[in-house]
């Protein structure tokens, strides 16, 4: 031990510093550690004896530094188009043959994106050719597909988006055939890869390619089974992309499999969907919605009732993520039909904070219409939708004057001071609806905007006019009203359709009444809201408010002049007098000054208004009174 300690002191006094492991070996009596061998030998011809990796790294740094300088000259908006072409050509000459090497770097990815965006067609073709050749070389070496690695990379994914936007039709076909097809599961495992896949699905692929990728997603765990039917399913069928419409491709793929493998493929697809539901960030993608739609249709037609209802119960908590695409809203409506009363109530409560966004969404408003059509608990549906649709801004109600969220009321309820203050506050609430309970919180401005919204008005129109094909295209809304197999799944709704609609209208009609009475002029002059005026006129609950609003609008001279100058308002008024009957016409004749009505019917383009007003009123002296020709 003395000898060992002597060696240790001798080594410690030297210039070489030992690590803990070497010191421990010396303490145990081992021999002095050998010096580490140099892993990189200096070769002749290399500057300063640097290893090859270090030299290549330095060379790449210098090259990217020069490329960044050119890029900084290319970026400003003041750069002319001719100068941009020259700079892109210089960058292309500088990075020739090495573009695929730099696309996974932050700066390299951005530089190549600018080359694709600012260059001419020849530059784009050269960049795309080099990227594709580099991809083929890497694929031949056994590496993962180039575009898949690019899409899944943190920085490369941005270049993948740019490639899909700027690629020619031929290049897009290459990308689909070599990189997207067969790699759906790999792309879905990465957040950025899933974004790129969904972008390609929505913007660059034809219906046939979309169907192939969505079915491949369902076969993620049984790829060999899918490969056995892929060629017969997509390549040997006639009709091309147009032949996919209206078909359930997943169901057809099951028919092509042997009978012993069909249940295996269906169970595998269900397991894949269950895993997707657990990752809510993936549920916003349209490719997922299309795959779930295919699977749900097959389950509803071919398998037992319990299996379809279990899938609907699994999807119900996340149904709001499906409502913003065409395929997704079909899944959402199917779940509403399949769920029992208990789970429907949970679904409605889960949508409470999303009602406004759904109403104004191109596809989401169809989910709200399906709730009106199939949920029997009209009190819950009407109360939930009314709270979000007609109430004043919830944020304003939750925030006090200082901008801080008010504390929740204690369990004991309102104090005496609060109750007393509520009674004193009744007059101040007149701007929201007159002070009566249930009416004092109506947000008239939002309600008016909703009536003028292209999609927001459709839920209101469904309550006012029902399933009228003049306002609801059967090709777009027919799936909402189609029932399911009642012999298999039971009765979807027990309440009569007319009774359900009347109860919902009574719950939501007060907001309509206040808008019709106070905002009629603006409602007549907008195309989307004019249809709501006609629908409200045909509904018993709101027809009186429409008549009052029209009388109030035509009783003011400035309003009459604006109505005469609006083509939409003139056509809407003519339809109102035609459909409103004598009640509407007589109310206008009795409630408005004769001079104003005469100015209305004698205005340019208002001949139809005068004709319908005279005919529907039933009075013989109207033509003479208004001096009609």
Image (cartoon, rainbow, N blue to C red):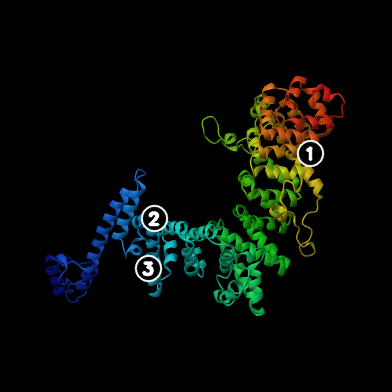
Q: Which residue lies furthest to the front in this view?
A: 629
In the displayed structure image, the side of residue 9 where residue 58 appears, left or right: right
Q: Residue at x 32, y 59 (%)?
A: 92
Q: Which residue is label 2 attached to?
A: 120
Q: Which residue is label 3 attached to?
A: 134
The reply to whether discs 3 and 2 touch (Cβ–Cβ < 8 Å) is no
Residue 538 tag number: 1
The CA distance from mark 3 to mark 1 is 67 Å
In the displayed structure image, the side of residue 353 where residue 569 appears, left or right: right
- In the rendering, at what x and y percent does residue 76 appear? 34, 45
Q: Which of marks 3 and 2 is in front?
A: 2
**Tag 1, which secondary structure?**
helix
In the displayed structure image, the side of residue 562 where residue 204 appears, left or right: left
**Tag 3, which secondary structure?**
helix
Q: Which of 512 and 418 is in front in this view?
A: 512
Q: Measured along the vertical axis of the image, is residue 336 above or below residue 53?
A: above
Q: Earlier in the sequence, mark 3 or mark 2?
A: 2
Q: How crowded is mark 1: few (under 14 residues within 10 Å), some or many (20 or more)?
A: some
Q: Residue at x 86, y 23 (%)?
A: 621
**Which quadrant would residue 151 be assigned to in this image?**
bottom left
**Which quadrant would residue 611 be assigned to in this image?**
top right
Quadrant showing the C terminus? top right
The CA distance from mark 2 to mark 1 is 59 Å
């Amino acid at each position: 031990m003395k000898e060992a300690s002597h060696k240790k002191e001798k080594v410690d006094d030297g210039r070489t510093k030992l690590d803990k492991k070497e010191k421990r070996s010396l303490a145990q009596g081992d021999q002095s550690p050998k010096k580490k061998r140099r892993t990189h030998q200096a070769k002749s011809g290399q500057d300063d004896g640097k290893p090859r990796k270090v030299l290549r790294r330095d060379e790449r740094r210098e090259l990217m530094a020069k490329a960044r300088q050119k890029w900084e000259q290319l970026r400003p908006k003041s750069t002319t188009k001719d100068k941009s072409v020259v700079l892109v050509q210089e960058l292309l000459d500088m990075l020739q043959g090495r573009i695929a090497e730099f696309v996974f770097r932050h700066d390299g990815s951005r530089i190549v994106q600018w080359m694709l965006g600012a260059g001419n067609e020849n530059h784009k073709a050269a960049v795309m050719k080099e990227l594709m050749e580099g991809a083929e070389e890497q694929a031949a070496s056994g590496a993962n597909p180039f575009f898949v690695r690019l899409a899944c990379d943190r920085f490369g994914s941005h270049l993948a988006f740019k490639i899909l936007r700027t690629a020619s039709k031929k290049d897009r076909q290459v990308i689909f055939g070599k990189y997207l097809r067969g790699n759906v599961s790999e792309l879905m495992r990465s957040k950025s890869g899933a974004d790129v896949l969904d972008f390609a699905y929505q913007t660059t692929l034809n219906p046939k390619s979309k169907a192939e990728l969505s079915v491949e997603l369902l076969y993620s765990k049984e790829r060999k089974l899918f490969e056995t039917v892929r060629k017969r399913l997509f390549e040997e069928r006639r009709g091309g992309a147009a032949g996919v419409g209206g078909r359930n491709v997943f169901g057809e793929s099951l028919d092509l499999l042997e009978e012993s493998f069909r249940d295996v493929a269906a169970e595998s697809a269900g397991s894949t969907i269950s895993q997707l539901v657990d990752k809510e960030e993936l549920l916003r993608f349209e490719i997922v919605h299309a795959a779930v739609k295919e699977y749900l249709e097959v389950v509803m037609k071919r398998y037992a009732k319990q299996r379809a209802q279990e899938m609907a119960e699994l999807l119900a908590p996340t149904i709001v993520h499906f409502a913003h695409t065409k395929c997704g809203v079909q899944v959402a409506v199917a779940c509403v039909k399949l769920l029992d009363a208990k789970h429907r109530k949970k679904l409605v409560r889960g949508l409470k904070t999303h009602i406004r966004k759904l109403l104004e969404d191109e596809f989401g408003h169809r989910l709200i219409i399906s709730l009106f059509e199939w949920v029997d608990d009209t009190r819950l549906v009407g109360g939930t939708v009314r709270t979000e649709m007609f109430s004043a801004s919830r944020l304003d109600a939750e925030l006090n004057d200082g901008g801080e969220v008010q504390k929740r009321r204690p369990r004991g309820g309102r104090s005496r001071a609060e109750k007393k203050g509520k009674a004193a506050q009744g007059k101040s609430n007149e701007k929201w609806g007159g002070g009566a309970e249930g009416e004092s919180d109506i947000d008239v401005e939002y309600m008016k905007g909703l009536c003028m919204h292209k999609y927001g008005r459709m839920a209101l129109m469904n309550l006012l006019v029902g399933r009228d094909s003049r306002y609801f295209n059967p090709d777009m809304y027919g799936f909402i009203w189609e029932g399911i197999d009642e012999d298999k799944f039971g009765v979807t709704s027990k309440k009569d359709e007319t009774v359900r609609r009347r109860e919902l209208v009574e719950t939501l009609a007060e907001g309509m009444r206040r808008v019709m009475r106070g905002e009629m002029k603006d409602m007549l002059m907008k195309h989307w809201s004019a249809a709501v005026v006609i629908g409200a006129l045909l509904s018993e609950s709101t027809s009186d408010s429409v008549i009052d609003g029209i009388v109030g609008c035509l009783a003011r001279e400035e309003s009459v002049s604006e109505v005469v100058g609006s083509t939409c308002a003139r056509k809407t008024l003519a339809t109102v007098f035609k459909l409103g009957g004598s009640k509407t016409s007589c109310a206008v004749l009795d409630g408005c000054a004769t001079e104003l009505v005469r100015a209305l019917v004698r205005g340019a383009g208002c001949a139809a208004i005068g004709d319908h007003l005279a005919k529907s009123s039933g009075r013989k002296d109207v033509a003479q009174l208004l001096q009609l020709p």
